[in-house]
Image (cartoon, helix red, strand yellow):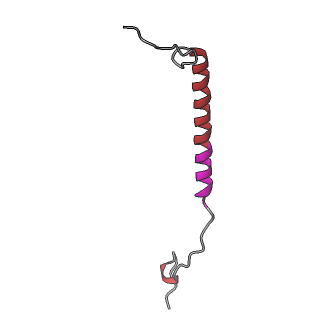
């Protein structure tokens, strides 16, 4: 029985040099995208300062009673 298969010269499993280069660039891209997304998320949820909270006088350290 004869099989009609054509060898693919551009197969990633046969060309280790270009496949390792491709995997390196893909990993660098994924790391950069992950860091950028994390930075954007931290910026969006950043601490926006001390809120102006109204505290009743009777709950202060030195309470003021009426």
x and y percentages locating residue 3 in the rendered image: 42, 11
Residue 32 sits in quarter: top right
Residue 40 counted in the magenta span = yes
In the image, residue 42 sits, relative to residue 66, either above or below, namely above
x and y percentages locating residue 36 in the rendered image: 62, 44
In the image, residue 51 sits, relative to residue 57, either above or below, namely above
Q: Nearer the viewer, residue 17 or 49?
A: 17
| Quadrant of the snapshot with the N terminus | top left
Q: Nearer the viewer, residue 10 or 53?
A: 10
In the image, residue 41 sits, relative to residue 7, either above or below, namely below
Residue 62 counted in the magenta span = no
Q: Say which residue appears at 52% left-offset and 85% top-offset.
A: 64
Residue lying farthest to the bottom in this orientation: 66
Q: Say which residue appears at 59% left-offset and 30% top-offset.
A: 26
**Magenta: predominant secondary structure element?**
helix
Q: Nearer the viewer, residue 53 or 11?
A: 11
Residue 47 sits in quarter: bottom right
Q: Say which residue appears at 48% left-offset and 83% top-offset.
A: 58
Residue lying farthest to the front in this orientation: 1
Residue 43 sits in quarter: bottom right
Q: Say which residue appears at 51% left-offset and 77% top-offset.
A: 60
Residue lying farthest to the top in this orientation: 1
x and y percentages locating residue 19 in the rendered image: 57, 20
The stretch in magenta equals: 36-47
In the image, residue 66 sits, relative to residue 44, either above or below, namely below
x and y percentages locating residue 45 in the rendered image: 58, 58
| Count of numbered tags | 0
């Amino acid at each position: 029985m004869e099989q009609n298969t054509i060898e693919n010269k551009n197969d990633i499993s046969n060309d280790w040099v270009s496949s390792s280069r491709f995997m390196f660039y893909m990993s660098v891209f994924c790391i950069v995208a992950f860091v950028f997304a994390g930075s954007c998320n931290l910026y969006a949820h950043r601490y926006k300062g001390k809120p102006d909270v109204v505290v009743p006088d009777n709950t202060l350290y030195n309470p003021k009673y009426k």
